[in-house]
Amino acid sequence: MTTPALPPLDGIRVVDLSRVLAGPFCTALLADAGADVVKIESKAGEDSRHLGPFRDGESIYFNVLNRGKRSIALDLKDPEDRESLLQLIADADVVVENFRPGVTTRLGIDYEAARARNPRIVYASISGFGQKGPMAGAAAYDLVVQALSGVMSITGTEESGPTRLGESFGDTITGVFAAWGISTALLAARTTGEGQHLDVAMFDSMLAMLPTAHSQLQASGVTPKRVGNRHPVSTPFDTYRADDGLFVLAIASEKGFQTLARTMGREELITDPRFMEDALRTENEPALRKEIEAWAAGRTVAQVLELLDAAGLAGSEVWNVEQALGSEQARYRGVVESFEHPAAGTVSYVRQPVVFGESTRPAVRRSPLLDEHHDEILGEARAR
């Protein structure tokens, strides 16, 4: 019988100086993959301990984002505490911070200070606009980055105006890119023995998530516009109305459209000059929508989806967050886990979603109380 492999980041020590969302999301992903994440907090606690939503006085937001970590509170302006931090870095593999550019230099804990203690350190700096550049010092929140990246300009409808995505994706996708960059740099460090400084910007990360819009702009020279739930290029690819609600239909091929027309009992649509290719269907989208919704009228969403599924076409209900998290699919995949917290009670979270072959999944570890592991962490540092 083959012995299961250890978690991919087993043995990796991460010193986490980050706060609120992008950085803690990154380090939570690393903890999910087996890394030992040491969270450095101020004496008052990391900012998100004081952000809602709350339950029994505990921030659920903080506890979800800081699962699997250990906490130590240090005053980084105090020379003794700063030296304790540098001792931790000396034996770590990774540092993650998301202070404004220049703050770590003023505190004496920047990449150069870390590298002087540990040449193989991978030091990730997360910021709104990068460590250098015309906007490097600008304040950045998710809303600001969504607005400046262009993603809001293509989200919503003409009537709604620019619309923020329904989650803080500017932060979370930056956390994903930071975790990817850290893992890549750790591989390089294993080969060369040298670490490096990673400059991860929210603005850059959001731009990297716009391949369709960027392609449209290059191909036509026309700035992409808001099209609601529609796909900007392919049709039919949208939400449509049945008798008891909305359903999603996603077709991006000629074969798929032909199958849809036959499923609808409207084979003549295949040779209709308005719909004979994808670009024409997109140009005549209102007319095609009328045909699809006329077919769906008199049918429930479930009945429509049964017909689409039988034809091998992609369609679905529109689930809310509760339905998605509680779905049989989510349960089967095991993506939602939970832990018991001494103050907040049962806290559920969505673990990092990649299945690493036969590697064992790290045991679930709850989020830490403030400074809970102070003596334990410093004792480990002194023992080395």
Image (spheres, helix red, strand yellow):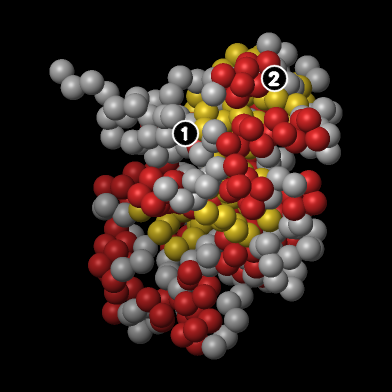
Q: Which mark is residue 274?
A: none
In the depicted structure, whether residue 235 falls above or below residue 11: below
Point out the image quarter for the N terminus.
Answer: top left
Quadrant in which residue 6 is drawn: top left
What kind of element bears circle 2?
A: helix
- In front here: 348 or 62? 62
Q: Residue at x 83, y 38 (%)?
A: 77
Q: Amino acid at mark 2?
A: His
- Mark 2–mark 1 Cα distance, whole angstroms, equals 19 Å
Q: Residue at x 81, y 35 (%)?
A: 79
Q: Which mark is residue 374?
A: 2
Whether residue 335 can be seen here: no
Q: Which label's residue is closer to the chain start, 2 or 1?
A: 1
Quadrant in which residue 14 is drawn: top right
* Rendered location of residue 117, percent (x, y): 60, 42
Residue pointed to by mark 1: 12
Q: Are marks 2 and 1 in contact (CB under 8 Å)?
A: no
Q: Residue furthest top?
A: 342
What kind of element bears circle 1?
A: loop
* Relative side of 183 to 272, left or right: right
Q: Residue at x 50, y 24 (%)?
A: 337
* Rendered location of residue 179, percent (x, y): 51, 46
Q: Residues within 10 Å of mark 1 (few under 14, many from 20)?
A: some
- In front here: 306 or 84? 84
Q: Residues within 10 Å of mark 2 (few under 14, many from 20)?
A: some
* Rendered location of residue 346, percent (x, y): 62, 16
Q: Amino acid at mark 1?
A: Ile
